[in-house]
Image (spheres, rainbow, N blue to C red):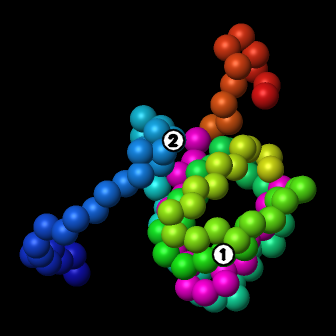
Amino acid sequence: MTQIIAGTKTEFAIDSDILALLPAQGCIELQHDAAGKIHPFHTHPVDEILVVIAGRLTFRWEGGERICSAGDKILLPAGTLHESEALDDAIYAIATRPPATIAGNEER
């Protein structure tokens, strides 16, 4: 059964870098990874921006590795091979968009 539960307004801010990635119609994903969660190496056909809200994660990509924590932003171009591992409970926001293109050029 559908319910509407009355509440009070809470503060909620969205990073401007994430808002800039939103398409005219779309969404932002909020991800929670428990400590030890691994997203094995993979790619996406879209550009992504991740903003770490809480916790820490090890982020790896071809040619690099970094421990990211609250406040860090990860700018991930489409097709980038990457993986992550939560070092403790990690919460992060993810926004996606089609790959950027150069005017007059259909490919990156």
Place of residue 10 in the rendered image (x, y in percent of width and height, measured from the top left):
19, 69
Amino acid at the residue labelled 2: Leu
Query: Is residue 14 visible in the rendered structure shown here?
Result: yes
Q: Which residues are magenta?
A: 81-97
Secondary structure found at label 1: strand
> Which is more toward the observer, 91 or 40?
91
Q: Position of residue 88 (x, y in %)?
A: 61, 87
**Residue 87 shown in magenta:** yes
Mark 2 = which residue? 21
* CA gap, disc 2 and disc 1: 22 Å
Which image quadrant for residue 84? bottom right
Main secondary structure type of the part rendered in magenta: strand
Q: Which residue is mark 1?
A: 57
Foreground residue, 72 or 86?
Answer: 72
Residue shown at the point (69%, 49%) measured from the top left: 76
Q: Quadrant of residue 97?
A: top right
Labels 2 and 1: the sequence-earlier one: 2
Check residue 18 for magenta coloring: no
Q: Nearer the viewer, mark 2 or mark 1?
A: 1
The residue under the point 73% across, 44% down is 78
What's the amino acid at mark 1?
Leu
Quarter where residue 4 is shown: bottom left
Q: Is residue 101 left or right of residue 33?
A: right
Q: Nearer the viewer, residue 61 or 4?
A: 61
Helix, strand, or loop for circle 2?
Answer: helix
- Which residue corresponds to the image point at 41% horizontal and 52% vertical from the top-left? 15
